[in-house]
């Protein structure tokens, strides 16, 4: 494995810190650490920035002049893509899916959406359930018709090129842990479009590290999520020249904490947000990292005494799209 062989545009503040969470750890009976990928820097940070480093590298190699991508209305991926485009003089065309059905003014106008507009992206919103891959292709076709050179980034930046960002993160975590004499029993992350989870699994597998990764799902049921992560982890390992490095048993997702659905908040998520904020001053988000923390809190007894690294994937900017949902719960 040699990541320097892949074109890359530096966007993130790396390495992100690997820090103890002593107070929450004590509460949960876990030797709990946090990998601060909420602090990657670009546009407020988050996990998509690592993926975008390799995706923009590829986009420039292909001579692109405009990025095209999609996400839910409060997509953190879209926000980071819009910022990366602005920072490198590229256009950015965004398609937002009204996936949660919310029409609350803060949801459709504040948080990530406000930032997308600040970065100058063009935005088109489509109905929930639209075929987003078809929408991406149609948008790219329109731009080609105008003489532009679009580069299409799938939802979440999750393809093998984007997942290289989390191969690099796996390497970073293992290196930092070795420097700290920290023997990690488990890495825990939210898992959605699978690039984060799949990249971590591929990176660890290719390195020969046997640290298990547990992904808490935010949308799909377990079988579908695991199949998606496994496929992407295998394709990513193949891109690194090690097509057989990833085995089925390396991919584990727990999708029991999704609640009512993607982007929908329940009391368990609110409790997780409040606990992280009031115990260690950590801001989680209601869609991803809050759901992963809800799962970790619920299952803490199983991990008692273990050293667990919680990957904070970011998303705090999305909180401001959820004011109307959250503020009544924060009294
Ligand atoms: C996109 C996102 C995730 C999920 O990562 P995937 O690579 O899509 O699985 C987790 N947390 C936050 C904050 C995100 O924006």
Image: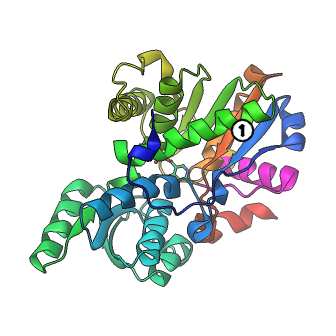
- Quadrant containing the N terminus is top left
Mark 1 nearby-residue class (10 Å; few <14, some 14–19, many ≥20): some
Residue occupying the point 28% across, 60% down: 61
- Residue 147 at what x, y percent from top left? 13, 79
Q: How many marks?
A: 1
45 in the magenta segment: no
The kind of secondary structure element at disc 1 is helix
The residue under the point 37% across, 58% down is 57
Q: In which quarter of the view is residue 20 placed?
A: top right
Residue 174 position, x and y percent, is 66, 32
From where the camera sits, is residue 47 visible? yes
Left or right, residue 306 beside residue 258: right
On the image, numbered disc 1 is attached to which residue?
176
Residue numbers of the magenta segment: 269-286
Q: Residue at x 32, y 56 (%)?
A: 58
Say above or below: 49 vs 261: below
Residue at (43% x, 40% y) in the render = 194
């Amino acid at each position: 494995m040699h990541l320097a062989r892949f074109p890359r545009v530096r966007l993130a503040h790396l390495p992100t810190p690997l820090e103890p969470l002593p107070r929450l750890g004590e509460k949960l009976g876990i030797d709990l650490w946090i990998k601060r990928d909420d602090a990657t820097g670009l546009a407020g940070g988050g996990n998509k920035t690592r993926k975008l480093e390799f995706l923009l590298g590829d986009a420039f190699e292909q001579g692109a002049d405009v990025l095209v991508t999609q996400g839910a209305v409060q997509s953190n991926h879209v926000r980071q893509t819009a910022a990366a485009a602005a920072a490198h003089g590229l256009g950015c065309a965004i398609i937002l899916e009204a996936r949660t059905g919310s029409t609350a003014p803060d949801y459709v106008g504040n948080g990530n959406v406000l930032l997308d507009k600040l970065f100058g992206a063009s935005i088109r919103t489509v109905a929930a359930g639209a075929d987003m891959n078809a929408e991406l292709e149609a948008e790219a076709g329109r731009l080609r018709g105008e003489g532009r050179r679009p580069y299409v980034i799938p939802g979440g930046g999750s393809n093998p090129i984007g997942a290289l960002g989390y191969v690099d993160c796996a390497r970073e975590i293992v290196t930092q842990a070795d420097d700290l004499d920290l023997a990690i029993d488990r890495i825990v992350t939210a898992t959605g479009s699978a690039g984060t989870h799949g990249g971590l699994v591929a990176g660890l597998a290719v390195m020969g590290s046997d640290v298990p990764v547990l992904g808490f799902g935010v949308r799909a049921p377990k079988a579908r999520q695991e199949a998606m992560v496994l496929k992407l982890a295998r394709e990513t390992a193949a891109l690194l020249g090690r097509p057989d490095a990833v085995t089925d048993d390396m991919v584990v997702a727990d999708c029991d904490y999704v609640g009512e659905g993607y982007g929908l908040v329940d009391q368990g998520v609110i409790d997780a947000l409040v606990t992280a904020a009031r115990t260690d001053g950590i801001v989680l988000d209601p869609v991803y990292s809050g759901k992963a923390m809800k799962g970790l809190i619920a299952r803490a007894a199983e991990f008692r005494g273990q050293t667990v690294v919680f990957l904070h994937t970011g998303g705090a900017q999305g909180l401001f799209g959820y004011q109307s949902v959250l503020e009544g719960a924060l009294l």
